[in-house]
Image: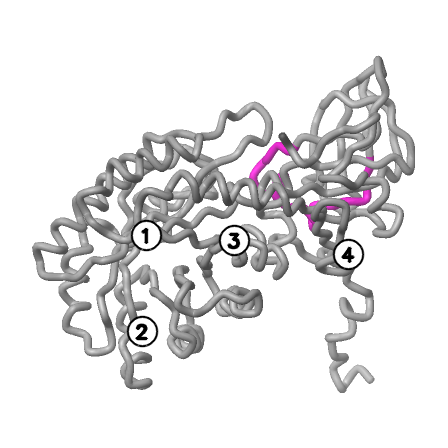
């Protein structure tokens, strides 16, 4: 059962009506369900309970501290891609030893800071990064635990901008070069080889690309072991997709069977980095109708949520279901375009979807917005960042308040020659 359900014609999140929350939190705002996150984490963890594995929440999918802490209390570590995400993970109570540091462009300051807090593993994505990490570790008199992230040249069959495991993608080291670079790493005094990593993309809806990638890296583990390297961790990344509408997502149990089948002979500790799967369905955006216009046989609905608040439709042509928070039986539906207030034609959330006749002040919910929503927001058009609200049962908390105009503008400094 979804935590977002209609009761007596009103959309509720868990035990609270959206209208009740909107009476004290102005629109637009993000609204997350604690129950959804707990259920998804339990479903994922149960699928992997039979093997030696760690679940590392992918913080880039939703970096709100309360969201991270929700998963930390359930037993998750963190997959991070920046120093800022490390600081968020630590603030949420995750120990350095439960953090894996990924990303193609780690700075020397980031490498140094991650060593100081004792991250579990660096997923290194280039030979130059390996050389830099070795020098930083030597300067600190320590060794950096390292897995090379390999690029297996596997097409995840998802959107071009979220595929990461194909030849020519910026991520990882070509798998054909891995043995040579591991040989170099084994001679570096600041490097301790601990594992192997792969991640082929996001929003993957088929087992086939996963199976192919896992098979390739499992073979590589065998070769690296025969070369004398101690490969104890196998990081398989994330990528498990969800349904934004017509898609049929993979069942975590089927995904787990593929992981277990393809990696059993490695005897490795398996790192898993779900993000979207855990939080995507857990969030909505609550937005208000500002104006409506009519023409070309459809209504145009202008809402107060903009592409700066939810970038996915403009960036990925992504589909998000949009529903009124109040419904009536037998209400006639008609085609509608839903657009935002930002001065860009790309600030459009839906074309020709079926909606009832709407009026200024009506509330809508943009669904499946818990992942890659607030984390990708900006202040374009000088629009302040919007609130995030977390619901548990019949309680809710504003876990990030709306940015004030003072915060938005106050950090800027007028050049002295202009005063």
Disc 4 target residue: 383
Task: Provide the residue designation for mark 2.
Answer: 133
Q: Is residue 357 above or below residue 330?
A: below
Question: Looking at the image, which residue is at 9% across and 61% down?
Answer: 228
**Which numbered disc flags the more N-terminal residue, 4 or 2?**
2
The image's mark for residue 158 is: none
User: What is the distance, in whole Å, between disc 4 and disc 1 at their CAs?
Assistant: 39 Å
Query: Does residue 247 appear to the left or right of 255 in the view shown?
Result: right
> Label 2 vs label 3: CA separation?
32 Å
How far apart in space, not on screen, are marks 4 and 3 (Cα)?
35 Å
Foreground disc of the pair 1, 3: 3
The quarter of the image holding the C terminus is bottom right
Few, some or many C-alpha atoms within 10 Å of disc 4 (few <14, some 14-19, many ≥20)? Answer: some
Residue pointed to by mark 1: 235
Q: Give the range drawn in magenta.
A: 302-320
Q: Which residue is drawn at 13% across and 64% down?
A: 183
Q: Residue 74's mark?
A: 3
Q: In which quarter of the image is residue 192?
A: bottom left
Give the mark nearest the N terminus, 4 or 3.
3
Q: Which of marks 4 and 1 is in front?
A: 1
Q: Distance between the residues labelled 1 and 3?
A: 20 Å
Element type where label 2 sits in the image: helix
Q: In this view, does 348 lie above or below 373?
A: above
Left or right of 24? Residue 277 is left
């Amino acid at each position: 059962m979804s935590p977002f359900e209609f009761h007596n014609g009103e959309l509720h999140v868990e035990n609270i009506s959206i209208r009740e929350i909107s009476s004290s939190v102005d629109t637009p705002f993000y609204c997350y369900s604690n129950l959804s996150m707990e259920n998804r984490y339990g479903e994922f963890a149960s699928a992997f309970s039979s093997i030696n594995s760690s679940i590392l929440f992918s913080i880039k999918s939703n970096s709100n501290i309360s969201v991270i802490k929700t998963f930390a209390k359930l037993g998750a570590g963190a997959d991070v891609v920046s120093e800022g995400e490390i600081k968020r993970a630590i603030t949420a109570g995750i120990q350095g030893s439960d953090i894996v540091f990924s990303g193609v462009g780690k700075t020397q300051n980031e490498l140094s800071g991650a060593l100081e807090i004792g991250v579990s593993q660096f997923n290194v994505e280039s030979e130059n990064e390996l050389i830099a990490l070795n020098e930083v570790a030597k300067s600190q008199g320590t060794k950096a635990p390292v897995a090379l992230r390999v690029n297996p040249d596997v097409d995840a069959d998802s959107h071009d901008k979220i595929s990461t495991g194909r030849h020519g993608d910026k991520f990882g080291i070509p798998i054909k070069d891995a043995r040579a670079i591991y040989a170099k790493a084994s001679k570096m005094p600041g490097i301790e080889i601990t594992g192997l990593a792969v991640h082929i993309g996001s929003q993957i809806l088929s087992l086939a690309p996963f199976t192919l990638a896992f098979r390739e890296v499992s073979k590589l583990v065998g070769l690296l072991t025969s070369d004398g390297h101690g490969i104890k961790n196998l990081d398989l990344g994330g990528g498990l997709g969800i349904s934004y509408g017509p898609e049929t997502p993979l069942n975590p149990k089927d995904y787990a069977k593929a992981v277990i089948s393809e990696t059993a002979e490695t005897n490795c500790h398996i790192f898993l980095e779900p993000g979207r799967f855990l939080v995507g369905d857990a969030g909505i955006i609550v937005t208000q109708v500002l104006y409506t216009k009519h023409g070309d046989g459809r209504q145009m609905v202008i809402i107060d949520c903009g592409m700066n608040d939810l970038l996915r439709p403009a960036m990925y042509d992504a589909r998000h279901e949009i529903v009124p928070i109040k419904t009536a039986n037998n209400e006639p539906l008609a085609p509608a375009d839903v657009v935002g207030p930002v001065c860009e034609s790309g600030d459009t959330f839906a074309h020709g979807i079926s909606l009832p006749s709407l009026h200024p002040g009506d509330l809508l919910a943009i669904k499946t917005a818990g992942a890659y929503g607030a984390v990708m927001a900006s202040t374009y058009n000088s629009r302040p960042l919007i609130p995030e609200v977390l619901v548990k049962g019949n309680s809710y908390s504003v876990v990030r308040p709306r940015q004030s105009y003072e915060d938005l503008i106050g950090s800027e400094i007028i050049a002295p020659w202009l005063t």
